[in-house]
Amino acid sequence: GSSACIACPDWHVPDVGATTCHLRYVRPGNYVLILYWLVFFRILVAFWKNIVIAFGLRRPFGRRLIVQQISFEERIDGDGVFVQFLAAHSLKSDLPITVYFQETQTKLDNQQKGHKIQFIGKTSMVLLNADGTRVRKSIESSQGVVVVPFLAALRLSWKFKGSVRLPWVLFGMLLVAVAAASCATPGILEPLEEHQLDDAKIVELLLAVSGLLSFLTAVVMHLLSQLRVFNPAQEPQLFKFRRDFSDRLRESRPTPAPCQRGAGRAVQLGELFELWRHFQPFIKDRSMLYVVSNIVRSITRPWQLSYAEVVGPSQTMWFVSHTWTSPFRAFVQGLKKHAQAVSRSGELVVPFMEMTFWVCSFSINQWSVEEEVVSDNIYESSFYKCLHSGSCHGTVLVLDTSATPLRRSWCLFEVLQTMKRIKDHQDEKFSGLWLCTESGTLNSGEASVEMAMTLGNVIADLSVKNASASFAEDKMMIDNAIQDMEGGFESMDAYLRGHLSQALNFMRNDFDEKFGKVLDKLDSFPTDSKVLDKVGSFPAEPKVSDTFFGFSDESVVKVNV
């Protein structure tokens, strides 16, 4: 009431009549304002985080979806190449879009035009051709990322809130606009004369600081979410299996050393089975191509060596010719059947699991393939050096039901070198060509009859001159090498058919013997003639010795090799 005014203490302000002083921050409206700003800041963080995730923070810019599996599958709604993601996403699209693949170690990588896909639910998608039909070819991987372009990721990001369904960007912008308008309008929380933040500059400063801090917070949160320490779910399961397997290898062989390429880089059968057993949940019925790109290369990456050098190389006993498209499971089973057959024959007095095989997938350094193959001088390649080494006892040709290796030029080159070694050296220790399948070796008569007959029909109509190679220059070089030998392609065809004919003859004799023993055992039991009369007699059939499941004596070509 006096004419002289006294300054209020710190954190105090005068009332409207400037008669008393009171605390500045005890008004309910200011508490509401602080709470409102906290909500506003949280909305900004969520808004910026969605943009940061859609941007990706590295090239190519876009939303990065971690791949769990890529595989060709047969489903009720149609066959196709399906991509399974590690975690659910919030992208919503009923129309195909274009995405990019990275680090899958397949031909999907590094495609500048991208690939058309269709999302299926929140955790998977299917690959499409340019015309919109589904891709129907074998593509297998358990690693990599799918990059959804930045603008497409923003457009397709949906925020679900009850029955409300708005694109995340529009949803965030709407909330930001409401919050900014609320905070920037004095008196919206309480009467104008009671509002403490009536200066527009203060409001603008708070908006700028909140926007900057929320953006930095969103970036930090996104970067931390990419670290396995803070988010273990970001790591595909295959990575954990690879890490465990690599740790075991380091314990047994901490410092792998390189060795000369050739026959000194074989792997034991037991080591192949150990690899298969450990990664069996992922390998399933997948091919050698999957094993090399998803497992072998990752295990050997720290040393840039071959798999044989990492696990400990051995001297070659058997050279293996095979194709990378056949199932790896069938491949290791075929080698096991071969090793067991050799062990029973007494040709090598070695436990079958300790027999060593030179396999290009494991014996060649996958980080320097061109140096190992030496396409300009095939006789300096690792293949040639191993096959012509003194420790090699023979060539194991692993066949599938389509005889795929005999349709590949490199496999034919290996068969050609096997023929030359037999002809030129007359080495008694070298046992030549072994035809092996998942069910057993044809040479020893242990393969299944169904497999043998299927291969017989395939090889009978097969001509090696129609074989293919990944590179035209390789096929030309190998074709020239075959034509340079006496008889050319016809001689090679006769050699392969002769081997199969010998195997079929051996299998027929073995089958006749076993079948005869079963009949003798059945005939040894007393029979009731009355029961036989009621059952009736079987129609006359040719004798088992006259035909062998469709092959008569005349149709089996006898060739001495």
Image (spheres, helix red, strand yellow):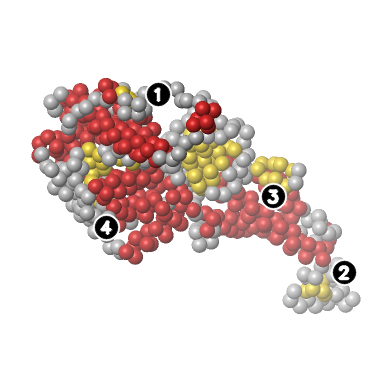
Q: Distance between the residues labelled 2 and 1?
A: 123 Å
Please give the residue where the numbered disc 3 appears in the rendered image: 176
- Determine contact: label 1, label 4, CB under 8 Å: no
Q: Distance between the residues labelled 4 and 3?
A: 62 Å
- Determine contact: label 2, label 4, CB under 8 Å: no
Percent x, y of residue 262? 19, 48
* Crowd around label 2: few <14 · some 14–19 · many ≥20 (10 Å): few
Please give the residue where the numbered disc 2 appears in the rendered image: 17
Please give the residue where the numbered disc 1 appears in the rendered image: 541
- Determine contact: label 4, label 3, CB under 8 Å: no
Sooner in the amino-acid sequence: mark 4 or mark 3: 3
Percent x, y of residue 126? 54, 36
Sooner in the amino-acid sequence: mark 2 or mark 3: 2
Of labels 2 and 1, the one closer to you:
1
Q: Distance between the residues labelled 1 and 4?
A: 57 Å
Is residue 34 positioned above or below 51 on the image?
Answer: below
Is residue 351 positioned above or below 83 on the image?
Answer: below
Of labels 4 and 3, the one closer to you:
4
User: Would you say 78 lies left or right of 421 here?
Assistant: right
Inspect the image, locate mark 3, and give the three-letter code of the amino acid beneath it. Val
Sooner in the amino-acid sequence: mark 1 or mark 4: 4
The residue under the point 49% across, 53% down is: 237
